[in-house]
Amino acid sequence: MEEVKFARADSDNAAPENSVRKLKLLVHLVVPLLLSLAGLGLALLLVYSFNVNDYDYSVFSNMLWQFANGYGWHTAIYAGEVREFFLADHLAWLIPLLSPFFILFPSPYTLAVVHSLSFAATFFLVPLFVKEVWKQHGREDYVLPALFLLLLLAVSRGFCGAWAYPTHMTTLVMPFLLACLIALHRKALVWAVVFFLLAALGQERVSVALFGVGMYAAFITQNRRLGLVLCAFSTLYFFAAVKLIIPFFSGGDYLYTDTLRLFHGVDRKALYLLLLFASWLFLPLVGKRAWLVTCCAAPIVGLNVLSDRKVMYAFSLHYQDLPSVFFLAAASFGLLHLLETGWLRKLPRKGLLLLACAGLFVSCADSYASDNKKMPLRFLAKWRPNASLSQLNAALSTYAGLPPEIRVYASSGIGPRFNMRKHRYVLTLQAAGQAFNSSMVFVAPGQNMYPYEGQKEEVVALLLSNPSLVLTQQTPELMVFSSADLCQEGGLCPAMR
């Protein structure tokens, strides 16, 4: 009988342990993996359906391809501008490290995949960060809070906005930023410095976020000397970038210096801050520790607020990528404060579950209702496959093997399809009337044609009347023109289809 009792006791103890293991597997592996796969699939769908930006997406994609193929820091999209030499625009030291991807996979989808990998890494790091915060407070019940915060990050409008704009190097260093915070909590200071320096490779804007990392080291993990060093390094790097290095390559001032105007659009900036906190259910404002972490976000958020560029204090582009890391950290401390000292600890488990679901629903609705039509939930809800889309993709794929000496001009909606070329230019209204040689011009009237959206007919008319061009293909989805000299050579001027 005693042996039976002991066996039952062991069985009873094993059941909760098995449940905990399954929950940990779910939070550390299954959910991050599912979010990563969903994000990757949707990112590829964005490119397939011509919903990526022809300027930034093409600029970075073309820059990476150019560097990988030995053409240095030049990008064809900025031809004729000071920014054609890319270091005159941004210090993106990550480009040499990423360029091998564009040797192995020279595709218009490659940049979207690389960005998806950064989001995937961030998802896998979230439970590790929450575990460290809980451990710091002597708690081990981090699994369900980590699941909640992981899902909250995945649907928050700032994080989703960065996903929907897969372009800049700042987004790619999000996992390094979060890994640095984890290393600080673990007192692994060498690794913290390594991740800090890797994050610094992203772009000059990252240096402002790195000042916040120094603040985090000093005030949250009590590494005051290291925090001071990190703050000093980030400050020196920022001013060296915007006052010395970039002006050296551009031959003038930093291109974005004149955009700093604090009192421009104060009402929109106030709304931006309100929505930023609301998307995190105001958790970053709960408790002293959460407040301190929010203060660490102040430098990078403040940079957005200082600007007179509306996109920086909105959620339609990538500018909330780095703030999302700090707000995740602040929300973690805020949630812990509520669970330890707030009224939440008095609620039964079912009540907590309902409240968590309600919070996630509110955040989903907020993300869906934002001003970015490419947000994952809205994009997925509204996207429908259609024959013209597949026909356009098929038509463009036939031109993938054009000789490298051909100069390609493409309307903005389909521009990203031609990023893997040395001579690839955006078709503008002014360019449509020029004399073309060794060139092919691609126009997709059904896709975006910014910045001349209201002048499509005028652009097409200019191309049709241009004596240096011959219309070689015309379908409802695609018009292709070849320069007259190519037609005389006979190889790239087929009969019109």
Image (cartoon, helix red, strand yellow):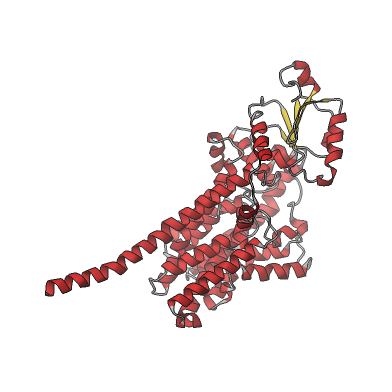
For residue 99, what is the image quadrant?
top right
Q: Which of 458 and 385 is in front in this view?
A: 385
Q: x, y (%) of residue 292?
A: 56, 73
Left or right of 123 on screen, residue 15:
left
For residue 111, what is the image quadrant?
top right
Left or right of 93 on screen, residue 442:
right
Q: Can residue 40 be seen in this view?
A: yes
Q: Nearer the viewer, residue 51 or 489?
A: 51
Q: x, y (%) of residue 97?
A: 54, 43
Q: Quadrant of the C terminus?
A: top right
For residue 189, what is the image quadrant?
bottom left
Q: Nearer the viewer, residue 460 or 5?
A: 5
Farthest front residue in view: 387
Q: x, y (%) of residue 226?
A: 50, 64
Q: Residue shown at 78%/66% (left/top)? A: 265
Q: Total label count?
A: 0
Q: Quadrant of the N terminus?
A: bottom left
Farthest top residue in view: 489
Q: Can residue 74 be seen in this view?
A: no
Residue 21, relative to residue 48: is it above or below?
below
Left or right of 1 on screen, residue 494:
right
Residue 377, relative to residue 251: is it above or below?
below
Q: Nearer the viewer, residue 358 or 434?
A: 358
Q: Residue shown at 70%/62% (left/top)? A: 313
Q: x, y (%) of residue 432?
A: 83, 34
